[in-house]
Image (tube, rainbow, N blue to C red):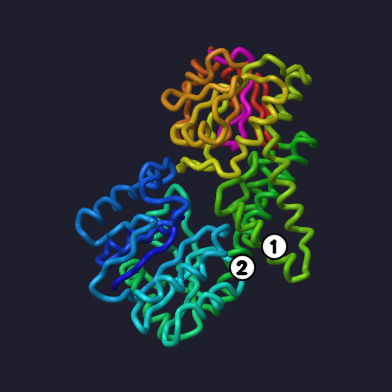
Amino acid sequence: MRVVIIGSELAAATAAAALAWVGHEVTWRPHASLDWARLATSAWLTSEPQLEAHLQEGRDQGRLTVLDADQTPDQAAAFDVVWLSLSPEQRAEAGELIAEHSRWLSDTAVLVNNSTFPVGETEALASQLGAGRSAVTLVDLLEEGRAWDTFTRPSRWLLGCDDDYAEQRVRELLRAFNRRREVFQRMPRRAAELSKLAINGMLATRISYMNEIAGLADTLGVDVEYVRQGMGADTRIGYEYLYPGCGFGGPSFSRDLMRLADVQSASGRHSALLDQVLDINEHKKETLFRKLWAHYHGCLEGRTVAIWGAAFKPGTARIDHAPVLTLLRALWAQGVHVRLHDPAAVSALQERLGAHPLLRCFDADPFEATEGADALMLVTEWKAYWNPDWQRLASQLDGRLLLDGRNIYDPDYVAAMGLHYRGIGRRADP
């Protein structure tokens, strides 16, 4: 099939690479705000496993054409599919972009709206297509850090579709990724759009609830890991998204929660629950700072803290709404020097914050950051941090304090190495 993809989101890049990989003729037109010249060197794209290589492969084999913002498609035949992957902030441009591209579409073309827009937006975009053409919602379920795998080996496709012909076309488009088992779940378009927002709202609620329980466990002197295991063993609850931590972030997750809040407000049904979820998450982003403050009894000026991890999650270079941003502001307000290591997100952090007199960044050896520090804060659970040289770490940390924002370490083992351990609802002393 002949496909034109519009947008500069991770979903657009992944779709362009994957659809060309299985033989479709793909033209990708990145959004003008982030054209190909900048996309090609962006840390979040180049650090996404397999994606850059498959994009290059598609271009080398002639199945993928990437356009500049001012270029127009130059194809011998009309496009069968227009794939839309815009950010929520670009929603106002969606109708105009579809109207512009409609002249290059076949009479029976299908619009695949892979953007997270308000409920009912796909129906509105369908009016820009012209008679005989259809529009569907394909919910963006990609996971940053493993986008290629989640697209090419999906556990499911959540398809919002109101007519059988459009479903048939989308199934053909994605047939190569639907061979192992049936992964399509079809529902009306508006239901699919709301489902996307509701899914992330529920996940955020579980995380925030577990963080609240972790705070209670801290107060009562209970190890929250026992509580987590007790809750997860209940089949009505399960273990997924029950890991307490120092807050969640990311461009998609955070934006979807705000979008759900907007939908609630616009419908006249204000959600006190969602407000609490968002408030708890912002509060948790400072939890490691509060533990540091308590350990040193508020005497923080002039101290040095090492931070491991800046990206909002392992496997990505993005720092959008990442807990580290809130944490850094709190530390700097107290005059704390920060030595930060991250294997992928240092460039993004420096671009966001610029040169700061209280910040030094490292992207090679994590132990460069811990030399002479009063404490180590584990913020992003990169696999390289899971099993450090404990003797070396203990010798380098002057303050012998480890603040584990993701509960990845065994408190008793850390304490046996001579370190004070403070996790989220967990603690141990030498």
The magenta stretch is 396-411
Q: Position of residue 244 (x, y in %)?
A: 65, 43
Q: Could you tell me if residue 417 is visible in this image?
A: yes
Q: Position of residue 121 (x, y in %)?
A: 57, 72
Q: Position of residue 415 (x, y in %)?
A: 62, 22
Left or right: where 356 falls relative to 13: right
- Sequence-wise, the earlier of marks 2 and 1 is 2
- Mark drawn on residue 118: 2
Which amino acid, mark 2? Pro
Is residue 397 shown in magenta? Answer: yes
- Mark drawn on residue 6: none
> Which quadrant would residue 221 be assigned to in this image?
top right
Q: Residues within 10 Å of mark 1 (few under 14, many from 20)?
A: some
Q: Main secondary structure of the magenta part?
A: loop
Q: Which residue is mark 1?
A: 262
* Secondary element at image label 1: helix
In this rendering, the answer to whether 132 lies above or below 212 is below
Q: Residues within 10 Å of mark 2 (few under 14, many from 20)?
A: some
> Which quadrant would residue 354 be assigned to in this image?
top right
Q: Nearer the viewer, residue 365 or 75?
A: 75
